[in-house]
Image (spheres, grey):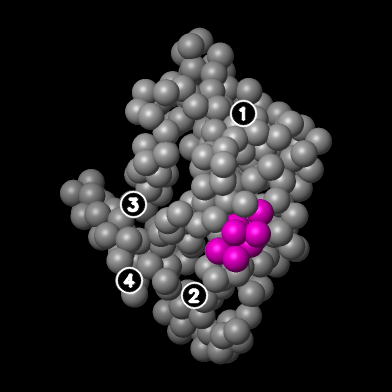
Amino acid sequence: MARQLDERIAAHHPVGRRLRVLDAGLGQGVQALRLARAGHEVTALEPDPAALAAARAAVAREPAGIQERIRLVQGDARDIGAHFPPGTFDVVLCHGVLMYVPEPAPVLAGLARVLAAGGLLSLVVRNADALALRPGLAGDWDAALAAFGSTTYTSRLGLPVRADRLTDLSAALTGVGAPLDRWYGVRLFTDPVADDRPPPAPEVLERLLAAEERAGRTDPYRAVAALLHLCGVRRS
């Protein structure tokens, strides 16, 4: 996914330019730290105090120059307009957040509002058109049959969450003035793997990641990936 994101950033912004990035829903902070290390100014929005504390500890371990490029803010993506004025950011990330939001349209409108003209909006969502695959591959036929036509599921953490369809999000992005520019599939071959399974040997992992990357860009495979990575661009 990092390669996909870097590819779209490079397609819409000059190479070497220091960008203003918002990570709306920081989580473990992987992308925020990676982009700060690449020289960008990163603001991270996170509602969970525990996650924010962990992020502060991770940032504190970085060199001073990187620490200066990261700003951590406690807040919710659903209230983004209360935190930032319009046109504040060149890139907005919202990865793994919309599945916890009952209705994505207001969140998307807020995210698009804080994007500058020509800015990139990067979303990672659960793919509603692939909900039957995980239980089906695990042999849970009742759950697989129940997943057809559904947009809700239970996460691996046991939480009731929501999935989105590409067609619906594409229409929603057009509606908020950041139409879909490119989309990818994420986690096709690796999704059925248990979270506690140890990683494969480095040479195997390299080939696995190459296969995932290829599938995420190739029809029909990307359409049934567990996650979708959508990139919209704010109209001028």
- Measure the alpha-carbon separation of dots 2 and 3: 24 Å
- Measure the alpha-carbon separation of dots 1 and 2: 32 Å
Q: Amino acid at mark 3?
A: Pro
Foreground label between 1 and 2:
1
- Measure the alpha-carbon separation of dots 1 and 3: 31 Å
Which of the marked residues, 1 or 2, is nearer the chain's N terminus?
Answer: 1
Q: Amino acid at mark 2?
A: Ala
Q: Which residue is mark 1?
A: 43
Q: In the picture, residue 27 is in which quadrant?
A: top right
Q: Which residue is mark 2?
A: 130
120 w.r.t. 37: above or below: below
42 w.r.t. 125: above or below: above
Left or right: 222 in relation to 201: right
Foreground label between 2 and 4:
4
Q: Total number of numbered labels?
A: 4
Q: Which residue is mark 3?
A: 199
- Measure the alpha-carbon separation of dots 4 and 3: 27 Å
- Asked if labels 2 and 1 touch by Cβ distance under 8 angstroms, the answer is no
Q: Which residue is mark 4?
A: 219
Foreground label between 4 and 3:
4
Q: Which residue is found at the position 52% from the left and 76% from the top? A: 129
What residue range appears in magenta?
A: 169-176
Which of the marked residues, 2 or 4, is nearer the chain's N terminus?
Answer: 2
Question: Considering depth in this image, is 130 or 135 the residue closer to the camera?
Answer: 130
